[in-house]
Every structure is written in structure tokens, then in C-alpha cells.
Image (cartoon, grey):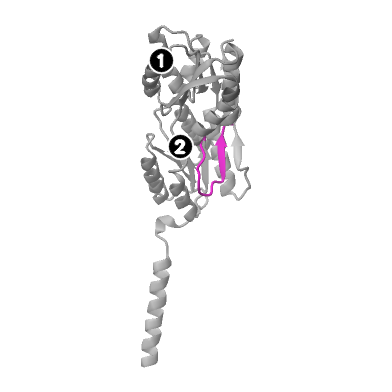
Amino acid sequence: MKKALLLIMSLSVFLLGACSLEPPSWAKPAKKGDGEKIKIGLSVSTLNNPFFVSMKNGVIDEAKKQGAEVIVVDAQNDSAKQVNDVEDLLQQGIDTLLINPTDSAAISTAVQSANNLDVPVVTLDRSTDKGDVATLVASDNVKGGQMAGDFIVKQLGEGAKVVELEGVPGASATRERGKGFHNVADQKLDVVAKQTADFDRTKGLNVMENVLQGNPDIKAIFAHNDEMALGALQAINSSGRDVLVVGFDGNEDAINAVKEGKLAATVAQQPDLIGELAVKAASDVLEGKKVEKKIAAPLKLMVKE
């Protein structure tokens, strides 16, 4: 009798231990049956920017071609919200995670959460500081910044006084575009001011109004994205000044402004292609194929013809 009781107690302890080690149902890797759709989670830094809307559309269009489902969440440029959004996506049992980080450092914990659940991660346009990412799909932001700097030197000559409008602090695109620009500007231009405007058009307008008041002799502005460039252009037009403005992204409003001779140039990305390539890369990873750690989408300097 005692032996039977001891056996029952041992089995009970074993079963309880096994249960305690069992992950919750949503944490188990998905096993797709025939005809079952792959579920893609897409976290975007902000959908209040045409560039990221185009990128999202590129993801959705390619996913549709592949018969996959996409769940889109908008971080609204809030890094804490983005981390929570990603945790919610993981609880919905996504098969792969696509992230366009608001902040490359802050998103690291969310990437690591996905790693712990064996959910492959692909980053778009901006990288993450920590965590295992299958690939980063982005333009060469350093090269783009250099292209902007070279264009300003070509138009105005060496020593011209310029202002730099920076993107969201902590975003890899901000760091890389700034680095590329300064590779040229620190040698050939005079950067009299640089301020962040968070990749936002209204902030670009407000920051530029203040910068213009304190710097009456500036000749050019390099903005880390088109939204800030277009905001700065509004401030310049209101002031009646003649200042050359260069943006980055190649969104529709910026390209139209270039064609009209209002914006001097924009370093044009292909956001829809970035989205498309990200889905293809995620699909390859899910199929066990090897992908490059960085997949580059081509850049082009758009100027008035």
C-alpha cells in the first residue's frame, strides 16, 4: 500500500513539474496545416507619415500575393507603446514579426521576447540595438546622407552655412543619415545648427522658424526626412528667405515639390519595395532558407529635371 502511495505521489510531482514548464498556448510555435495562412505581425513606428504608409502597403501587397495574413499596429512614435504592441502581437500567435522601430534601443526587449518564442524577426528601415534579427531591410542611410551633403556642396560650394534637422533621437536612421551627412559636412560645409524635429512636418516648421531667427545667413538645410523638409520649407517661404532645402525619403509630396522647384532635392527611397522585400525575407526564414543580414533597397537623388 505504501509503495502504491509513493508511486502516486511521485507521478503527481512529475506531472506538476511538467505543467509548470509548459509554456502558455499562445507561446508555442505555430504548426501550420495545409491551406492555413501564415500570420505576419507588422509594427510600424507611425502611420502619420506617408513613407511608412507606403511601406505598410508594400508589406500587405506582398503578403496578399503569398496568401498570408497581416496584423498591423501603429506605435504613433511612442517607443513604450511599440513594445506593448509587439507583446500583443506575440500573444496573437504570429508566425513572424516585422518591426519598423521607433527607437532602436527601446525596441530591443520586444525583439528578445520574440526570440524567446522562436518567432523570426525582420526589421524595416531602422535596426535594433539588441536581440536576434534575421535581417534588416533598409536603404543605405549613410550613403544617402553623403549624397545630400555632396549635393549641397555642388550647389553652393565649400564653406556654406547649413542647418541639419535630425530625426527621432535613438532611431538608427537618425544616426546613420547624420553620420553620412557629416562625413561630407565636417570637411566641406559649416553646420551652424542641428536640432531634432522627430521626423515630423509640424515640428520641422516650428523648429525652422526658431532656427531662422537665430541664423540669418544660412544657405541650406538638410532634413533627415521629407516631412521635416517640407515643414522647414513652409517656414522659409513665410520668412521670404532663399534657402536650399534637401530632404530624404522621396515621398509623393516631396517629389511634387522638387518638380515644382520648391524643394531642391530629396534622397528617394522605395518604401513599398522595403515592405515587399521584408515579407519575402520573412517567408524565406520560415522555410528554413538563409538570408543576408542586411538587404539593401536602392536610393536615388531626385532633383528638378
**The N terminus lies in which quarter of the figure?**
bottom left
Measuring from the top left, give residue 153's x and y in whole percent. 59, 16
Measuring from the top left, give residue 10's x and y in whole percent. 40, 82
Secondary structure predominantly adopted by residues drawn in magenta: loop
Whether the magenta-drawn stretch holds residue 119 is answered as no
Tell me: residue 102, above or below residue 188: below
Q: Which mark is residue 91?
A: none
* Front residue of this view, candidates 33 and 192: 192
The residue depicted at 60 percent of the width and 37 percent of the height is 295
Measuring from the top left, give residue 90's x and y in whole percent. 42, 49
Q: Are marks 1 and 2 in contact (CB under 8 Å)?
A: no
Tell me: residue 212, above or below residue 224: above
Judged left or right of residue 259, residue 207 is left
Residue type for callout 1: Leu
- Give the residue number, with chain letter if any, for mark 2: 170
| Mark 1 → mark 2, Cα distance in angstroms | 26 Å
Closest to the camera, between mark 1 and mark 2, is 1
Pick whichever of labels 1 and 2 is earlier in the sequence. Answer: 2
Residue type for callout 2: Gly
Q: Give the SS element for disc 1.
A: helix
Judged left or right of residue 188, residue 27 is left
Q: Which mark is residue 212?
A: 1
